[in-house]
Amino acid sequence: MTNESLKIPQATAKRLPLYYRFLKNLHASGKQRVSSAELSEAVKVDSATIRRDFSYFGALGKKGYGYNVNYLLSFFRKTLDQDELTKVALIGVGNLGTAFLHYNFLKNNNTKIEVAFDVDEGKVGTFIGDVPIYHMDDLEKVIAEQQIQVAILTVPALAAQPIADRIVQGSVKGILNFTPARLSVPSSIRIHHIDLAVELQSLIYFLKHYPTEEE
Ligand SMILES: NC(=O)c1ccc[n+]([C@@H]2O[C@H](COP(=O)([O-])OP(=O)(O)OC[C@H]3O[C@@H](n4cnc5c(N)ncnc54)[C@H](O)[C@@H]3O)[C@@H](O)[C@H]2O)c1
């Protein structure tokens, strides 16, 4: 989904959505330029990293002037393919899945959950917001019809691998896996794993070993 001609390191690419969201808010409030120190404070990334990241974007901050917000925004929009809608499917409409469906991703960028799937007959055939919930029997058919590119997995861990095996046969190129299951997928598929326990442990580790400046 990123422009392949631009060679941006993965760690930098991961910070792009963070920068993008902040700069959009800045732009909306009428600001034309921003310093790496201001950005650093807002997105909690040190300013040396920000300067290095931005040099990959061809944005060179001027001393006493900072970065041009419009230039950065148009760069991010192109790089993140914001002008093109990425179609997302959510699989598993339980506690977590339902929360995601209620959250409107379009507020932040052009990503939309178009369809959802579950095995629970009580949920199949209903809608959450404007998102229809289909039965898993229709998974391949609906994914192909809608040309879904990304799937979010919020099913019980044991159900995850068989579902991954099914979706990688079609148009899906990326999986956001919220289940604790480690999934194997073909190398052509990108998989990001979000484990809240690991994130929490990492936060606690940083709190212990890298106390914030105020302390
Ligand atoms: N709830 C949380 O805070 C949380 C946090 C981190 C990770 N997780 C992980 O996310 C996943 C979902 O958690 P939850 O709390 O929403 O669970 P849940 O039990 O509330 O929801 C699971 C949903 O998946 C559906 N389902 C079951 N088997 C399926 C299948 N084969 N195909 C399609 N749908 C199927 C169920 O009908 C249900 O609607 C779990 O793997 C859990 O470990 C949850």
Image (tube, grey):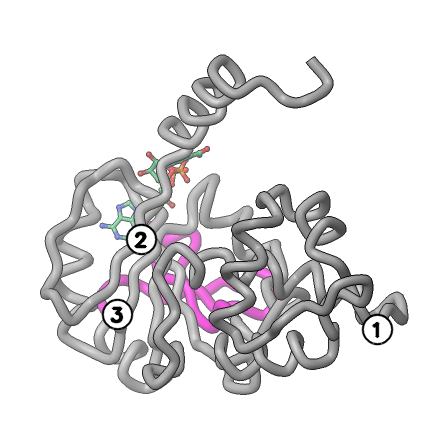
Residue 80, given in percent of the width and then of the height, sits at 49, 75
Judging by the rendered image, the residue that carries numbered circle 3 is 139
Residue at image point 29% right, 66% down: 174
Q: Which mark is residue 192?
A: 2
Q: Which residue type does callout 1 highlight? A: Gln
Q: Is mark 3 within 8 Å of ligand 1?
A: no
Q: Which mark is residue 32?
A: 1
Q: Is residue 144 left or right of residue 117?
A: left
Q: Residues within 10 Å of mark 2 (few under 14, many from 20)?
A: few
Kindly report the distance in space between the C-alpha atoms of the residues bearing marks 1 and 3: 46 Å
Q: Is residue 167 left or right of residue 143?
A: left
Q: Nearer the viewer, mark 1 or mark 2?
A: 1
Kindly report the distance in space between the C-alpha atoms of the residues bearing marks 1 and 2: 34 Å
Q: How many marks?
A: 3
Residue 215, given in percent of the width and then of the height, sits at 69, 13
Residue 101, given in percent of the width and then of the height, sits at 54, 57
Q: Which residue type does callout 3 highlight? A: Leu
Q: Is residue 141 left or right of residue 151?
A: left
User: Is 47 in front, or is 15?
Assistant: 47
